[in-house]
Amino acid sequence: MTMIKRTDFASDFLWGVSTSAYQIEGAADVDGRVPSIWDTFSATPGKIRDGSTGAVACDHYHRWEEDLDLAQSMGLNSYRFSIAWTRIFNGVDAEPNPKGLEFYSKLVDGMLARGLQPWCTLYHWDLPQYLEDQGGWNNRATIDAYLQYVDVITKLLGGRVKHWITHNEPWCTAMHGNWDGMHAPGNKSLPLALQICHNVLVSHGRAVPLIRANVPDAQIGIALSLHPIKAGSDSAADQAAVSRHDALRNRWFLDVLYGRGYPAEALALVGKDAPVVEQGDMEAIAAPCDFLGVNYYFPEVVVDAPDEYPLRTRIIHPQDRQRTDFGWEVSPEGLVTLLERVARDYPTGDLYVTENGSSYDDHIGEDGAVTDTARRDYLIRHLAAMRDAIAAGGKIKGYFAWSLLDNFEWAEGYLRRFGLTYIDYPTQRRIVKQSGQWYSAFVRGQNS
Ligand code: FCB
């Protein structure tokens, strides 16, 4: 097994976990929270594999102290969380909800009291339903509503929170939400998805100067879900498919964020389905940030597929790869490739791995322990990969494991467990898994 120890990394390296509001909080109708698109979507029969919702989830809204205690007891020095917009505003012209503000204020105080540097994600997919009813992210008024929300939150927490992530994975917001329909709100239209993607990116770019104005010493970034793209074979056709696929999957985001506009290769492929771009949008999206958050899970393997619109590519799942129980390829090398690629091709500044993790079908053993050796090994191998990327010159400054707790895994409901801590949902009991114990020992410098 790979040897890895904390002293392989800088002493100020951030070791954290990542979470998101809808996936853990529950308390769906408590203290003035209003429905989000995920409440609506998950209540729609057939959308979530086990028919579940996030209405209770890990009940983190009521158990946050215990959960922050867990993160502290693991020895972590940072904690990534997201704010539920639906706890802050209950309508377009509403006043902020004091109960919602109080909850996140307490939560942040709780992190600081436990030595956890707060990393706040402003949008992790849970758009208020009242905004969706007016067109959601397809309506540019949602950008204004987002900025109003960002203004309130950064004024409230800016004295205590210095690290801000505007959006989590706009690919998923836009494409899973509106192209393949796997996520809320469940539309199936490429032009709609591309317009929504554009509007979300505009909202990111316009939020950056607003956050800077409210929090002068802020560190601001966005978290992208990025995949290294590999060819399914050595054929020239499959090799050419890689670039087309990459153009939409990765460069569509990276190129615009770093001021290069949408990649010509992708624009040619999507043709008339390209988004409407208003004057000033591209400049806004390219607002300089302080860091890039990389969410990495697996590489995508593609082949040439002339009938597939618009990219003429298809993702394949070769049999000969190691996979998690979710079927995702385990490829620590992919993390090295990805980190090196973004640093080589873009002026990203500091990089943070803002999510990385694995899903396995965990069980409580007869000894009461959750022995998730496969997840522990996944973690070890990905940390070793990150060490290699740093040794090669990468400016990677922190790692946030996905996730602290098992949680509501979107369209998969509770069927997929990603936690370093097991949740026994009927009792809400938390059991730190073998992987969590390993991470804790590692962070404390107790293993080698
Ligand atoms: C990412 C999401 C996160 C979680 C992990 C497994 O795409 O950002 O909320 O669902 O996947």
Image: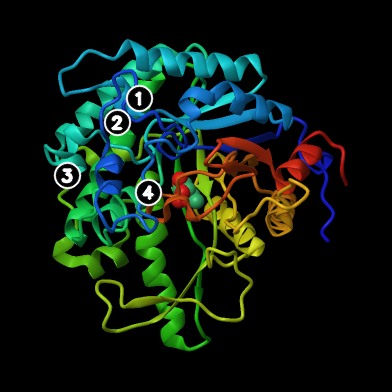
Q: Which residue is mark 2?
A: 206
What residue do we see at 13% from left, 64% from top? Answer: 272
Point out residue 159 in the picture as x, y percentages from the top left corner: 49, 11
Mark 3 belongs to which amino acid? Asn
Return the mark for residue 59: none
Point out residue 43 in the picture as x, y percentages from the top left corner: 27, 46
What residue do we see at 30% from left, 24% from top? Answer: 33
Q: Nearer the viewer, mark 1 or mark 4?
A: 4
Q: Which residue is mark 4?
A: 52
Q: Are marks 2 and 1 in contact (CB under 8 Å)?
A: yes
- The answer to whether one can see residue 353 in this image is no
What residue do we see at 33% from left, 36% from top? Answer: 204
Q: Which residue is mark 1?
A: 209
Point out residue 429 in the picture as x, y percentages from the top left corner: 61, 35
Marks 4/3: CA–CA distance: 27 Å
Marks 1/4: CA–CA distance: 39 Å
